[in-house]
Image (tube, helix red, strand yellow):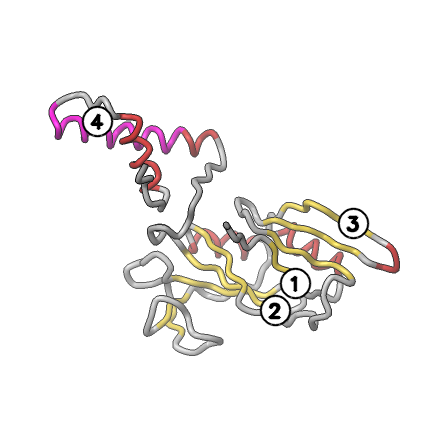
Amino acid sequence: MDIRLELVVLPVSDVDRAADFYTGLGFRKDLDHAGAEGFRIVHLTPPGSPASIVIGDGVTDAVPGSARGIHLVVEDIVAMRKELVARGVDASEIFHDAGGLFHHAGMIDRVAGPHPDRRSYGSFLSFEDPDGNGFVVQEVTDRIPGRIDAVVYRSADDVERALRNAAIAHGRHEAEIGHEDPQWPAWYAAHMTRAAGLEPSRT
């Protein structure tokens, strides 16, 4: 049975202030529901994300601002920092860890700047929401094989780009084998799933 992490509940003290902060980051407001006795739930989704956050009144008894280490993943951390700063967020400088792929807690072993090789999973920045809930932004450009189990295209342009890249690679493939490949659909499927970080189907 598949198990998907889809929702993180964040403790906040002022729902409207927090909602304005997250929509100001580009999060989509999916739901803003007020119920009986002051209950309120606001559901927000980061752009391109299958997972969402929930804030509200009566949705958690955690102390506002006590959430830590929530990771957001982007393909270009330098561009992301510029965007955060432009949106008024007090984002940290980009950093990497002195001794490993993943960062230590707090400020331990932080080294200024992206990973020297710009290695996927190796560059970070941090910021907080108005209550102090802590986020880390991580740059991921090449997925570990098997890390994801679905190919998601966010637009027709993404699909076109993937098809064009596959067509170029398939042209090289047929030049190497010296003839037209009658199994080209299977070849395209395997190529596109590998490019997306998936293991090609064995069937």
Q: Which residue is mark 2?
A: 67
Which image quarter is the C terminus in? top left
Where is residue 187? Give x, y as percent: 27, 31
Q: Who's the residue at 37% across and 32% down the image?
A: 161
Residue 24 falls within the magenta-colored stretch: no
**Mark 2 vs mark 1, CA separation in Å:** 7 Å
Q: How crowded is the residue under tag 2: few (<14 C-alpha within 10 Å), some, or many (20+)?
A: some
Q: Quadrant of residue 65?
A: bottom right
Q: Earlier in the sequence, mark 2 or mark 1?
A: 1
Q: Which residue is mark 1?
A: 10
Q: Which residue is mark 3?
A: 33
- Please, what is the three-letter code of the amino acid marked with disc 3? His
Q: Who's the residue at 61% across and 55% down the image?
A: 7
Q: Earlier in the sequence, mark 3 or mark 2?
A: 3
Magenta stretch, residue numbers = 160-178
Q: Considering only vertical position in the picture, is 116 above or below 198? A: below
**Mark 1 vs mark 4, CA separation in Å:** 49 Å
Q: Who's the residue at 30% across and 36% down the image?
A: 190
Q: Earlier in the sequence, mark 3 or mark 1?
A: 1
- Please, what is the three-letter code of the amino acid marked with disc 4? Gly
- Please, what is the three-letter code of the amino acid marked with disc 2? Ala
Q: Earlier in the sequence, mark 4 or mark 2?
A: 2
Pointer 3 with pointer 2, Cβ within 8 A: no
From the image, give the main secondary structure of the stretch colored magenta. helix
Q: Quadrant of residue 185?
A: top left
For label 3, the SS is: strand
Q: Which residue is mark 4?
A: 171
Q: Who's the residue at 65% across and 50% down the image?
A: 44
